[in-house]
Amino acid sequence: MQIKYSKAFILLFSWIMCIPIHMKAGDNDTLLVEAFYQSLYNYRFQSADSILRNMHSIGVNKDIIDLSNISYSWWRIISGENSNNDIKKLFKDIESSIKYTSGNMKPGSASQEQILRLIMLYSYKSRLCNVNNSKLAGFSAFRQSFEYFELLKPCIHNHCDLYNFVSGLYYALGGHIADEFPPSLLGINKNYADKNKGYKLLELSTSSDIRLIKTESNYFLSKLYLELQENPEKASRYTQFLINQFPDNLVFRYNHLLALHASGKFEEAEAAYQCLAKCARENDQLTLQQQIHFEKEYTRLRKK
């Protein structure tokens, strides 16, 4: 039997959160984590790797290191370093982290940090399955993440912003999927299929004082408006914000280019590509494969 996947269904597999949960992190740990993600977002991959190694050497919390390491591997993969070995290694790291977290959970009394962590890990697994063209396995991983999402409690202590972001994604994507499929058919609680609530929570997250949540919420709103709402003009407002914050981030630049192209602003899209290509060429922390990755993607776009 062949399954037809809607845009919302595919995007559901592709939501990836690289927001670390500061589980009992000390001040020095927190500063290192922030520096790591700052380097990652700015496409300074060698610097991010150096910080990650430092986190290992000084004994930063294993939970924090694991999520940071997975985030690092993911960004390298979506930037062109996506060989079968790279993907297999990341699968292995995710499975190991899931096993570690699950093994430390007490039956019936899992902490909110553990639940959030498993939601993120299964979301990474879901996306990797999709990259590997294993959509059924990706949906299975999503179903597992959704089971943990239902265990989340709203605004627990310092996780209000993170809860708003995570639940905003689930409500919005669940709502879009419900437009095309009965939620029960996919194992989605109909109470969580609420686009309006989802978009409101994500908009709320764009005002977060936590920079990573602010960044991720703007990123996913740009994806939602571009790919599901088919409103590239509005999507470009979020992509422009991201470029202003992280001008060297090639993923953000390419998504902005896509929004301009979808709006029929072909000259602006071409200019955006030239800026992207310049950033890639001048970044000495990227491999050649990473530098030319989006050049290949744009070449395919031009041919459509």
Image: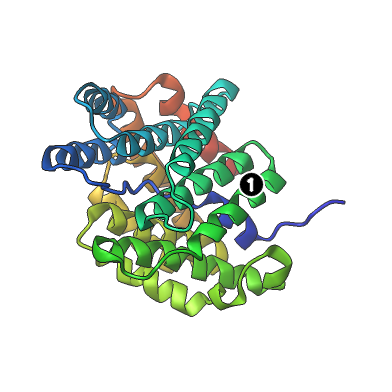
Residue at 64% across / 36% down in the picture? 132
Comparing 102 with 125, the one in front is 102
Question: Colour scheme used in the picture?
Answer: rainbow
Residue 194 location in percent, x, y?
A: 53, 77
> Residue 233 versus residue 50: which sits nearer the camera?
50
Does 192 appear above or below 27?
Answer: below
Residue at horizontal 12 percent and vertical 43 percent from the top: 27
In the picture provided, is 235 more to the left or to the right than 278? right
Number of numbered markers: 1
Residue 14 % position (x, y): 54, 50
Q: Residue at x 65, y 73 (%)?
A: 178
Residue most extreme to the left: 27
Q: Position of residue 302 (x, y in %)?
A: 57, 43
Q: Is residue 230 visible?
A: no
The image position of residue 273, as x and y in percent, is 41, 42
The residue most toward the front is: 107
- Mark 1 Cα shell of 10 Å, populated few (<14), some (14-19), many (≥20): many
Judged from this view, the residue extending furthest toward the right is 1
Residue appearing at x 22%, y 21% in the figure: 57
The residue lying toward the viewer, choosing from 122 and 276, is 122
Indicate left or right for 297 with 255 as reference: right
Q: Amino acid at mark 1?
A: Gly
**Residue 118 visible here:** yes
Residue under circle 1? 138
Q: In the rendered image of this protein, does residue 212 appear above or below residue 158?
A: above
- Residue 204 vertical position relative to residue 241 in the rendered view, above or below: below
Q: Secondary structure at mark 1?
A: helix
